[in-house]
């Protein structure tokens, strides 16, 4: 499986791409080519990757290492949890889950507290983190269909918690996804770290 992935900005030309096109490479040797330059990795989980291309007409690609492109669509907030792709819709407050191997939408959900089309998504286990820029953020529990507000910012989602780097206070703050309770887990961090 693809565990460690990096963006090679000088990809090959074996599938008709131009020399210097972006290529996602797994440390184990598999790769994904979507063509174009100036793109960015959005998320990687198991053998799947979401990639936003650069250029004048950016697109979002979803691929499976060793098998190639599975989807091409407009750029939007997206996150992977194994073979399940969580995506923002064009409707404020709604997210979709999509099975990549089954090639079908699993569900469209209305997320309590989500009042925008999110700019960021992260997924881990039964949890989906959403953010509306710097204005608001929360964690959606896909099993209970509930959402808890969390402070937006420099946040990473774990399985049942978030960790936010509070740059002003130089701390890491853990928030329990089920309860919303918070605690400082590290302090004295460097301002730029």
Image (cartoon, grey):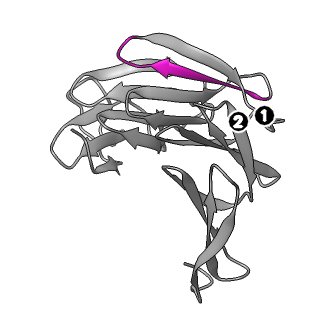
Residue 132 against residue 49 in the figure, above or below: below
Res. 182 image quadrant: bottom right
The x and y percentages for residue 52 are 51, 36
Report the front residue among 107 and 8.
107
Residue 88 against residue 176 in the figure, above or below: above
Q: Secondary structure at mark 1?
A: loop
Q: Residue at x 38, y 33 (%)?
A: 82
Nearer the observer, disc 2 or disc 1? 2
Res. 11 image quadrant: top left
Q: In the rendered view of the protein, which quadrant contains the N terminus?
A: top left
Residue 59 among magenta residues: no
The x and y percentages for residue 191 are 63, 84
Residue topped by disc 1? 112
Classify 10 Å Cα crowding around label 2: few (below 14), some (14-19), many (20 and above): some
Report the front residue among 122 and 110.
110
Q: Main secondary structure of the magenta part?
A: strand
Report the front residue among 45 and 16.
45
The x and y percentages for residue 10 are 30, 47
Classify 10 Å Cα crowding around label 1: few (below 14), some (14-19), many (20 and above): some
Alpha carbons under labels 2 and 1: distance apart = 6 Å
Do tag 2 and tag 1 residues touch (Cβ < 8 Å)?
yes
Residue 68 circle label:
none
Q: Taking 64 as reference, is 97 left or right?
A: right
The x and y percentages for residue 54 are 53, 38
Residue topped by disc 2? 146
Residue 97 among magenta residues: yes
Q: Taking 103 as reference, is 132 left or right?
A: right
Q: Provide the residue span drawn in magenta.
A: 93-102
Outermost bottom residue: 188
């Amino acid at each position: 499986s693809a565990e460690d992935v990096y963006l090679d900005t000088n990809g090959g030309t074996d599938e008709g791409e131009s020399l210097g096109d972006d290529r996602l490479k797994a440390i184990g040797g598999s790769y994904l080519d979507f063509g174009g330059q100036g793109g960015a990795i959005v998320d990687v989980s198991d053998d799947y990757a979401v990639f936003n291309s650069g250029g004048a007409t950016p697109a979002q690609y979803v691929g499976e290492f060793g098998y190639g492109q599975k989807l091409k669509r407009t750029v939007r907030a997206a996150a992977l949890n194994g073979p399940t792709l969580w995506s923002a819709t064009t409707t404020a407050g709604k997210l979709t889950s999509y099975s990549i191997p089954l090639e079908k939408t699993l569900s469209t959900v209305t997320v309590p507290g989500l009042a925008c089309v999110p700019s960021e998504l992260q997924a881990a286990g039964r949890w989906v983190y959403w953010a509306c820029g710097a204005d608001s953020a929360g964690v959606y529990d896909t099993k209970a269909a509930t959402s808890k507000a969390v402070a937006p910012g420099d946040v990473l989602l774990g399985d049942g918690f978030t960790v936010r780097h509070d740059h002003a206070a130089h701390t890491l703050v853990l928030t329990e996804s089920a309860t919303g309770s918070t605690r400082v887990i590290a302090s004295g961090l460097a301002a730029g770290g």
